[in-house]
Image (cartoon, grey):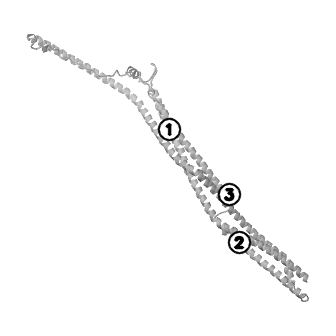
Amino acid sequence: MEQELIELLLVAKKALMTGQTICAQANTYCQSSEMYVQTIDKIQPKLQFTNNHIDIQLIALERIKEYLIVQTTNSKTCISNYETQLEVLSIELGGIFDVLKKCTVDKDILAVNKERGHSIVDIADNEEVTLFDYISDQAITEIQRQAYDEIGEIESISAVLDNLIKSISSVISETALLRENAIVISLDEPVSLFSDDKLQIQEDQIARMADILTSLTNHYRQLGEATRLYQSDPEGGEQLNITVLQDDHDHIPSILEDLRDSLDEVKSISDEIKIRYQQYLKIQSGLITVLNQLEYFGSFQGDIICEKIVDTDQDVKKHETNLEDHFKQLASLAEWYRFYSSSYHYLLLEIERRKKVEEKQEALRRELMRTFEDTYNDEVQQRREWSLQHGEYLPEVLCPFIKDAPPRLVIHVQSDTGRLPNVSKET
């Protein structure tokens, strides 16, 4: 029996040591789990804050992008309106020029101008001259060119804004993708929702394992006590009943298997918590990368984008002001040339009116000259008759003045101008 007790004792001791080792491992896993959970509790609020901060940054970039989209859309609309307006003015001026090119200047007007040395158009004798020959369209061409240049500048600014939109969109999409890849689990879920149940299962398993270890310890002590009693009284020891100890011995393999199963459960839970811990570390690393990218963008491109936004706003306003000035000039010239065309026809009417006035003045001059001549002749006749009746009896020295001739009235036409043109009926 002694040998049997010793063998049972050795097995019990080995089982106890194995159980202690298993429980120590389980305890280590539990401590690791608690450490992981504590770390997660500390970093989760920071990760939530960081994620919210990234949200704010992305929202700000979205608003900047939306603002740029509105500005670009407005610029493109303005470009279309300005091109239409410029095309309308150009067509209007082209129509006016066509009218001026078809309006031939009367040949006698050209002849009178040449007689007076005022001909500014170098033409051949048989060549027709139009109203268009008296103007220069180079000024209009230059204004139109300047207007197109201003529109081109606005188009260039619109292209710059498009590039800014693409750059910001790229940053937003890349940042969103990095954050999406980083956040492998929801940050809104409380840590306790995941960890409390896991830790409780581990605690339950540890308590169960502690009970098993206590039973193994008791079994080992009972075997030690039985062996000591037998060795102290071998003859009386034969009466010892070790049936219960033998039964406990038979259950040692299953007991150790239970311990290993509990250890596996504890380890599995610890691995889950560790995976969750590693996921939080991955989120932390990913969000730091996102923040670094946003900080880099803000430091190196943010200021440049803001300056470009301000500069482009000012430049667009400047070019729009210049365009408005060019359009006013073109509209003013168009109006002037319309009046120029109509005024030529009024010029023809004015020439005819003045010719009629000259004719009236000439008729009045002739009539007055006849009246003056008749008055003069009457006076000469009366003086002759007086001399015959009275003058020959008077001494000449008494009234030499009486022989003076009567005054003769004349009309002097004061005019430094030449003739007026004879406008043809065709004109």
Q: Which residue is mark 3?
A: 181
For the residue marked with disc 2, what is the amino acid? Leu
In the rendered image, the vertical position of residue 251 relative to residue 334, given as above or below: below
What is the CA distance from the residue labelled 3 to the residue labelled 2? 28 Å
Horizontally, residue 205 falls left or right of residue 222, namely left
Q: Earlier in the sequence, mark 3 or mark 2?
A: 3
Q: What residue is shown at x 56% (from left), y 52% (from top)? A: 64
**Based on the displayed image, in which of its 4 quarters is residue 27 positioned?**
bottom right
Work out which residue is located at the far front of the displayed protein and give it. Answer: 232
**Residue shown at the point (69%, 60%) measured from the top left:** 282
Give the residue at mark 2.
199
Inspect the image, locate mark 3, and give the three-letter code of the amino acid beneath it: Asn
Does any portion of residue 183 appear in the rendered image?
no
Residue 43: quadrant of the picture: bottom right
- Of the image marks 1 and 3, the number of the one nearer the N terminus: 1
Residue 342 quadrant: top left
